[in-house]
Image (tube, rainbow, N blue to C red):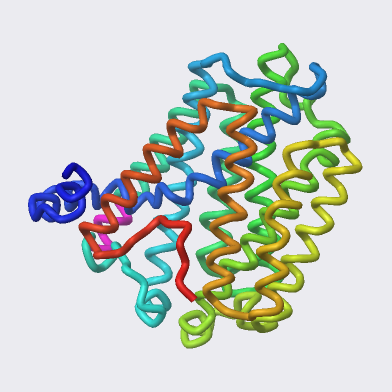
Amino acid sequence: MIKKFLKNNPIHRKIVPVFDILFLLRPTLFFPVWVMIVVGMAMAKMQFTEYPIWLVAFDVKVFILFIGFSFISASTFILNQIKDVDSDNVNKKLFIVGNKIKITKAELIMKISLGIGILSLIIVNFGILLIGLLLFLFWGVLYNLKPLEAKKKPIIGAVINAIAGFLLYFAGWVMAFSEEGIGFFSSINLDLFTSLSPYILCFIAVSLLTTIPDRKGDSETNATTFAVKFGFLPTIVLATILVLIAFVVGLKLSDPISSTATIVALPFYIVTIFRRKESDVLRTIRYSIFLLSFFVMVVYPWLFPAVFIVFYLSKYYYWHRFDLHYPTFVVEG
């Protein structure tokens, strides 16, 4: 009875417009953002404590850190939506900007989101604030705006996404070091880059896959993404190789999170190479993010309630606003 009410009662059609601004922020894209921050924290903690690491204590500054990076990331997602109106129309995406929210209003919300993010990170510390500003510079300005407009360039776009992944990881790393009384510059060492490597490889792999479903619209709007430039098969093969390397590196580093998540996700990549279906690409993207999130939640259980709320609130919103069953792990085809 409750399920029927939540799914079919017409009152929800009147409620969901209230959430338009929230979903303009693209909260489902926070999952990889949060995961990269948490693994940065966890790998930094391993510099001081033997595994297993269990980050169970609630810390107000860490909570504010997540708030800050969520809002800064959201501002880059809004900017991306504003600049992708034409290609998203071609790809028949259910686009909020220009449909439910005017572009001028979306621009204002982007600035407010960026402002909230910056103010939050000021409370944490200025090293973290610097990382947040760099994230907006690379993932927002350089990725979406001219003259660079990296999202329309296959190699540069992948590099920018890698830098964004590094900055998120670095934020978690610096936060963990600061809790040990170690300053920003003192936290930068070789271990930072070696421990990061399997996660950044996975981050790049998933970023490459996301260019495949949008390749038609990107091609028609002169956006030369990786999938547009090199095609379906080379993109998925490269992504698979990156995940395989990440698994090997994770083993070498004795990192149970990256090694376990990658070996469990790898079959989805292999199946996609042989079947070459777009549905398999979507399935690989979703399960790659889910699997890493799942293993990270074992280390940092505070991530679970955030993911749970965003996941089911999103299902409620997209179903009643767009008749879309999203997010979901079920992919037809």
Quadrant including the N terminus = top left
Q: Which residue corresponds to the image point at 32% horizontal and 55% vertical from the top-left?
A: 107
Q: Left or right: where does residue 295 sit relative to residue 189?
A: left
In the rendered image of this protein, does residue 325 appear above or below residue 185?
below
Residue 225 horizontal/vertical position (percent): 61, 76
Q: Which residue is at the front of the view, 132 or 87?
A: 87
> Magenta: predominant secondary structure element?
helix
Question: Residue lying furthest top in this view?
Answer: 181
Question: Residue lying furthest right in this view?
Answer: 252
Q: Is residue 49 magenta?
A: no
Residue 329 horizontal/vertical position (percent): 47, 57
Magenta stretch bounds: 102-108
Residue 28 horizontal/vertical position (percent): 43, 50
Q: Which residue corresponds to the image point at 52% horizontal and 19% vertical from the top-left?
A: 61
Q: Which residue corresponds to the image point at 15% horizontal and 47% vertical from the top-left?
A: 5
In the rendered image of this protein, does residue 257 appear above or below residue 223?
above
The quarter of the displayed image where residue 254 is located: top right
